[in-house]
Amino acid sequence: MDLLNALVDKGLRREPPTRDEALAVLATSDDELLDVVAAAGRVRRHWFGRRVKLNYLVNLKSGLCPEDCSYCSQRLGSKAGILKYTWLKPEEAAAAASAGVAGGAKRVCLVASGRGPTDRDVDRVSKTIDAIREQNEDVEVCACLGLLSDGQAERLREAGADAYNHNLNTSEATYGRITTTHTYADRVETVRQARAAGLSACSGLIAGMGESDEDLVDVVFALRELDPDSVPVNFLIPFEGTPLAKEWNLTPQRCLRILAMVRFVCPDAEVRLAAGREVHLRSLQPLALHLANSVFLGDYLTSEGQAGRADLEMIADAGFEVEGAGERTLPEHRAGALAAPGGGSGPCGGADGSDCAGGTDTCGQAGGGVPPSAARTDLVAVRRRGAGTELPPNA
Ligand code: SF4
């Protein structure tokens, strides 16, 4: 296929596809799907080999958010029966992080629900980073605390955070239908602040919120413009009790096309397979490893992922290898401070229904001619173990 040959050539040169080429990837047929995966897989292997980076989420503060992000189980007025708790103590967060590291994670993502941190919250997170580093000196730490105020990114960087996650989630044109309590421009500004402070920027999207192909291409090109080191790709988990509970728009094939498009547009960024992979890719998850070079291990913020052991087995069975603590994630030209463990810039991303960390959910828009898949509410399970509970984490 001429299109795919052209996209591979561009990806190997770090040259972006045109908007029409990106749209054409999303419009490919199921007959062409394996060719699309193979082509994007060439770009992935060129920049990241067969390595898969594991990331582990720690939900420092769950639920009770005053914001109204439609996709989020922690939103204002959410009826989802999720765990609700206020800030974990530093030692509790460090214990959860250690479980993730023991399971193979080289990055922990510290997430808190809410519009953004107070200065006191930044102090708490700084102490939590200290507690984590006491137990795991070399682990990368990403913070995901919502919208930042002046000076907070710098303080997090000084406290030892390597990265900051804040997702754009969807296109600027559709953002107002997803959230009314803050704006797309607010989000862009926080990503810029994080980068300016020397934090590695992590920013991604949520697919499956009823968006069109054009919306998806818009948000991915906007992300390329912001140039985050890592791009989490979430697939909406339609939580009962949220406005987007009925949005079951994705098929496994559609998810693979979206991931391939992201890889072609952001060829040398860490593309992270994030929340919703179990729910929407289902038995095709291993094919996604040919596109993404990074995944979350175990559970998400408020929902359960597959068992951590199953993640490791899937990676090995698909012929990939877990990236070691001493290996560099990013290609040399963009490795920056993260070249040295504990150093300083890297990605993060999120989670299941919160954007503070990368959530997933939908708005109410017609979606790009994609046939809806049957609702699989049986695949959506609220997290009941790990941080904030007495039960051991899934890692
Ligand atoms: S995504 Fe974050 S800001 Fe939005 S409702 Fe959820 S926890 Fe609050």
Image (spheres, rainbow, N blue to C red):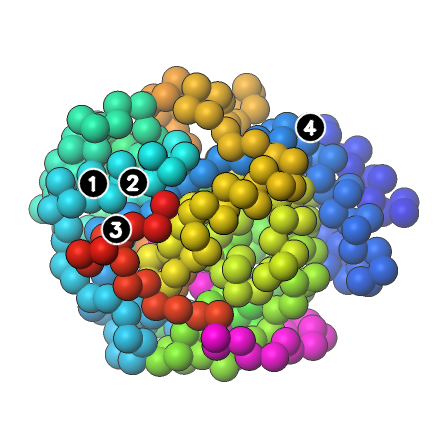
The residue carrying mark 2 is: 99
The residue carrying mark 3 is: 392
Q: CA distance from mark 1 to mark 4?
A: 36 Å
Q: Is 368 included in the stretch rendered in magenta?
A: yes
Query: Quick check: marks 2 and 3 in contact, CB under 8 Å?
Result: yes
Q: CA distance from mark 1 to mark 3?
A: 10 Å
Q: Earlier in the sequence, mark 1 or mark 3?
A: 1
Question: Looking at the image, which residue is at 54% across and 43% down?
Answer: 313
> Is residue 136 rendered to the left or right of residue 230?
left
Q: CA distance from mark 3 to mark 4?
A: 38 Å
Which kind of residue does numbered mark 1 sit on? Ala
Q: Which residues are magenta?
A: 357-378
**Local secondary structure at mark 2:** helix
**Local secondary structure at mark 1:** helix
Mark 3 CB lies closer than 8 A to ligand 1: no
Q: Earlier in the sequence, mark 3 or mark 4?
A: 4
Q: Earlier in the sequence, mark 2 or mark 3?
A: 2
Which kind of residue does numbered mark 2 sit on? Ala
User: Where residue 372 appears, x then y in whole percent?
Assistant: 64, 77
The residue carrying mark 1 is: 95
> Is residue 91 rendered to the left or right of residue 156?
left
In the picture as drawn, the residue positioned furthest to the right comes out as: 2
Q: CA distance from mark 2 to mark 4?
A: 31 Å
The residue carrying mark 4 is: 46
User: Where residue 166 appears, x then y in whole percent?
Assistant: 38, 49
